Amino acid sequence: MSGRPAVLVIAGSDSSGGAGIVRDLEALADFDCEALCALSAVTAQTHGQLVSVHHVPPQIVRTQIRAALESRAVGAIKIGMLGTGATVSAVAESLPRGGGIPIVLDPVLLSSSGGVLLDEEGREQMRARLFPLVTVLTPNIPEAASLCGVAPAASREALLEQARSLLTTGVHAVLLKGGHAEGAEAIDLLVTEHDAPQWLASPRLRARCRGTGCALASAIAAGLASGQSVEDACRNGKEYVLSMLYARAPAG
């Protein structure tokens, strides 16, 4: 059996290939990680529209996770789109306890075109049942605001307040992504239980790329599976996404 670290990805598919589990697997391959999969939903999408969603029955999601965990040792778990409260509950019931396997949760609420990818019950179940199991939560600015029930943050003070609010739900670390903000730099905020807040800055590029949130969370999971600290995994994940955007930025 390969000695490469393995990551279990629990996420939905995207027929356009721009996001979801396709993007997760690309990122894990780039980090030389093996991937195990539990499919939560099948979506029909273009790069500009969410056409339709089929939710995989929660019992099948549960069975996939348990079978994957029995197949080989897993170094980290990455969770993306879940879709419904029933699926969130099934995932929460199936995850290992005790903190031995780091878990990265990208709280996918909407598609980039605005389609709903997690229902209201799912949001409530996610906060109550999944967050206490999570090592790193990776919301963007609109997602963080929605999960906190407040307006999107427009200042560093508001970002810090929302990240700390999410930290009180039981997650060990929050990486609040700044891609939706304005300015010459894209600044992410990393808040953990014990360390001082870290502001992770990179140039803001004139590039559009779907699936960056999926790629970032999977890159962080790959780092954690390889034994990196949360801070190093987040910094390296951000650098990885920056390289994706550089490849798509217009010349000149």
Image (cartoon, rainbow, N blue to C red):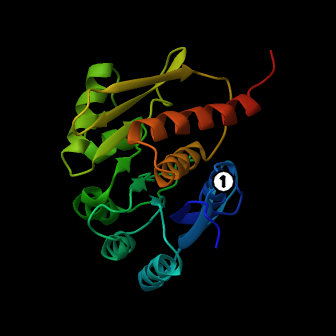
Residue 58: image quadrant is bottom left
Above or below, comparing residue 165 to residue 159 in the picture: below
Residue 240: image quadrant is top right
Furthest toward the left, the residue is 168
- In this image, 37 relative to 244: left or right? left
Q: Residues within 10 Å of mark 1 (few under 14, many from 20)?
A: some
Count of numbered circles in the view: 1
Say which residue appears at 26% left-offset and 26% top-offset: 196
Give coordinates of residue 234: x percent, y percent: 46, 38
Say which residue appears at 31% left-offset and 28% top-offset: 159
Pointer 1: what residue?
32
Residue placed most toward the observer, 135 or 72: 72
- In this image, 22 relative to 146: left or right? right
Task: Look at label 1 and name its amino acid.
Answer: Asp
Give coordinates of residue 74: x percent, y percent: 48, 67
Residue placed most toward the observer, 147 or 166: 166
Above or below, comparing residue 223 to residue 161 in the picture: below
Give coordinates of residue 205: x percent, y percent: 64, 23
| Residue 42 in view (yes/no) | no
Residue placed most toward the observer, 224 or 67: 224
Say which residue appears at 66% left-offset and 39% top-offset: 209
| Residue 122 in view (yes/no) | yes
- In this image, 89 relative to 244: left or right? left
Give coordinates of residue 94: x percent, y percent: 36, 76
Above or below, comparing residue 84 to residue 249 in the picture: below
Quarter holding the C terminus is top right
Residue placed most toward the observer, 170 or 145: 170
Say which residue appears at 38% left-offset and 72% top-offset: 91
